[in-house]
Image (cartoon, grey):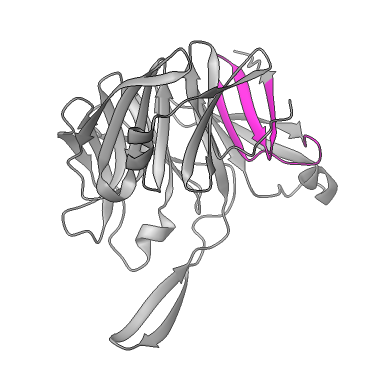
Amino acid sequence: MKLGFSPEAICGISDASVILSGRNNAEYTLFGVREQKLTRIDIDDQLQQSLKPPVNIVVNDSDILFLINNSATLMRGRINNDRISGFEKIKLDAPLFTRVSPFTPGALILRAFDSTSKYQHLQKVDLKTGTMLAVADIFGHSRGEMFLTDGMLDFDSVNSSAIYIQYYSNKIYCLDSNLNLKYISKTIDTVGTGDITAASRTVSVGTRETFVPPITINERSSTDEGYLFVLSNLKADNETDRNFINNSTFDVYQTGNGRYIGSFHLPTLNGHKVDEFMIRNRTLYVLCKNFYATYKIFIEP
């Protein structure tokens, strides 16, 4: 299905509609896709003015969450008849955050800065009050570690676990509902952690250092019914250049123990590889530039 715009993300599913988000100049836009029909979801002016980028938009059933990263603020509302209504503003117990995932109906998991604003950890926060419920310090505090450990957060409802997979290494972290570490596993990619490049330049008040991250290993991830699906960015040793260019590769792991069970390829759509994806109830939803498609997934027990 060709869309009339280029969405930035798949936010979730509400009332059988897949919710897509994008931006038109400074304004955020939302659309619902259902049975190959695209419907715009109205965001009123008051809410729109509160959405200062970067903003994470998460949809869970009819609930929609706008998480404003740079102000640690949550706007919560409901999708009703192609409009967002009844929204409320909640201040979170986190100075700033960079990643977010729904955890339970009443909680979120954030990758957020600590009180020093120098390092990041995982936080579980109450959705009603914004209060911090648990903390997990699984990332290092060494130079450049904040960049190297950047990654994606997912929630595994089968095992009630948070899954964190890094962009630049082959590590997968699994934590329980209280953010206790259950295991650390690895993806099938043989790369461990890439080297980070530091560049310094002199400014009027001293020396400023910037970091250039290594190549991305894992592009995107999604969990569904006890499985973790990872969109890989690396060509396998036994894969031809042509096959790598013309397909997107998904690696599949069991969330209960991190065990790899297999991979599958998805051909390019109109010449484009997968940019974004989400899997719910064994249905794969993908965005390839301004094209949208769905596929059924079958996993042998």
Q: Along the line of sight, which residue is nearer the eye, 287 or 233?
A: 287
On screen, 279 above or below 34?
Answer: below
In this rendering, position of residue 28 left or right of residue 38: left
**Residue at the limit of the structure toward the right, as seen here:** 242
Q: Residue at x 66, y 50 (%)?
A: 234
In this rendering, position of residue 111 left or right of residue 223: left
Q: Quadrant of residue 174?
A: top left
Q: Along the line of sight, which residue is nearer the eye, 260 or 164?
A: 164
Q: Is residue 160 visible?
A: no
In this rendering, position of residue 27 left or right of residue 5: left
Q: Quadrant of the N terminus?
A: top right
Q: Quadrant of the C terminus?
A: top right
On screen, 299 above or below 20?
Answer: above
Q: Residue at x 40, y 53 (%)?
A: 149
Q: Along the line of sight, which residue is nearer the eye, 252 or 61?
A: 61
Q: How many marks?
A: 0
Q: Residue at x 48, y 24 (%)?
A: 12
Q: Is residue 211 visible?
A: yes
* Residue 56 on the magenta span: no
* Residue 274 on the magenta span: yes
Query: Where is residue 106 drawn, in percent x and y?
Result: 25, 21
Query: Where is residue 244 drawn, in percent x and y?
Result: 77, 45
Q: Residue at x 44, y 70 (%)?
A: 211
What is the span of residues highlighted in magenta in the rendered image? 268-294
On screen, 110 above or below 13?
Answer: below
Query: Where is residue 73 drawn, in percent x and y?
Result: 25, 40
Query: Where is residue 32 drawn, in percent x and y?
Result: 55, 21
Q: Along the line of sight, which residue is nearer the eye, 22 or 264?
A: 22
